[in-house]
Amino acid sequence: MEDLNESKQTQLPNAGSASGSSEQQQHIHKLIGSINVLMWLVGILLFVVFVAMGYLLNNNGKSTVQSPDTTLLLTQEGASAIPAIGDGKDYWQAPSEDEMSKQANAEQLLYGKELIAHTANFLGPKGSVAQITNGMNCQNCHLKAGTQPWGNNYGSVASTYPKYRARSGGIEDVYKRVSDCFERSLNGKAPLKGSKEMEAIVAYINFIGSNVRKGDKAKASGIYELPYMDRAADPEKGKVLYAAKCISCHQTDGSGVLAADGKSYTFPPLWGKNSYNQGAGLYRISRFAGYIKANMPQGATWESPQLTDEEAWDIAAYVNQMPRPSKDLSKDWPKIAEKTFDHPFGPYADGFSETQHKFGPFKPIKAAKDALTKDKK
């Protein structure tokens, strides 16, 4: 109470009261002015906060947006959304490991799976069984031991083999198909038919596709067929994209990353002496482009791809123009007219160049081949 009383005593009620009142009014006006400025600043601050929140909500890195028809991936750069590869309806799913364990030959099937997933540990340069491959694993190309949708899986192998293949010009069984992979993708020698390893691999592949009716092709089996572009795939554009999206796993020189034990690859080589050779299926640009579209870079899936169609084509063009082991292909495609549109080596039955057969554009080649087939009918 003493402080309050002292305050009243200092109001100078006598001489000088007019000047005191004037000073009080000036003080009040200054106070009101300060409050107005403060409120103005608060208003500006709130406006900035609301604008920033709106920007963050619309541009917050990568986010997946669901719609009734498609899954969209928004990129950090704010680029147009990349749609999922189909809706996933009725996509093939491999039998479970639990179901595998109940089979009479479960031990053989599990060994076959191990050989697919960790091929080099058994059959690579430091393999425990034999040294007959380049150190890559079958799983480097056939993702999740050949079970991933659009991951070059084995879903339709058992249901479609034996079958005629134009590359060999004859009827092939699963043993022949596996041998080709060892000789081309693994740039080595195939295990002998009847060996423990070959029989386990074939048994596993046949089991994986046992839920597909004979003669049918499972949905999302094998490799996604990427739509053709109106232009040729561009290795120079692919080089830039490779540097931005692929180097962290596959390295600047394409050599990949060896596992800690030095027996196999954590990330496989895409070119060079330890990569797939020129006879491999992925050396065809359409196969490589479709494969990476659905599965690369790391983390991408058919549900949330990270590459546009054009980016996939261009990266494939860059990777497949790089040096790699050669192979004698003189016995491939004995019927030249049956040679696939993107086989990069002549001769051809059409008038298109090797360069166009390798990089495109492929629409004219496909149209000419379709017309020739129609005329023969």
Image: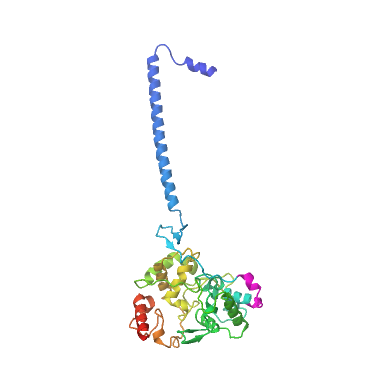
Q: Quadrant of the N terminus?
A: top right
Q: Main secondary structure of the magenta part?
A: helix
On whether residue 139 falls in the magenta region, the answer is no
| Mark count | 0
For this orientation, the residue located farthest to the top is 14
In x, y percent, where is residue 317? 40, 73
Tell me, what colour scheme is on the image? rainbow
Q: Which of 207/320 is in front?
A: 207
Residue in view at x 40 percent, y 69 percent? 238
In x, y percent, where is residue 145? 56, 72
In x, y percent, where is residue 282? 46, 76
Q: Which of 312/324 is in front?
A: 312
Res 263 visible: no
Q: Is residue 263 above or below residue 168?
A: above
In x, y percent, where is residue 90? 51, 68
Q: Quadrant of the C terminus?
A: bottom left
Q: Is residue 216 above or below residue 172?
A: above
Q: Which of 28/302 is in front?
A: 302
Look at the image and give the residue range highlighted in magenta. Answer: 96-108
For this orientation, the residue located farthest to the left is 351
Residue 70 image-quadrant placement: bottom left
Q: Which of 56/163 is in front?
A: 163
Res 29 visible: yes
Residue 24 image-quadrant placement: top left
Is 5 situated left or right of 243 in this image? right
Is 106 situated left or right of 343 in this image? right
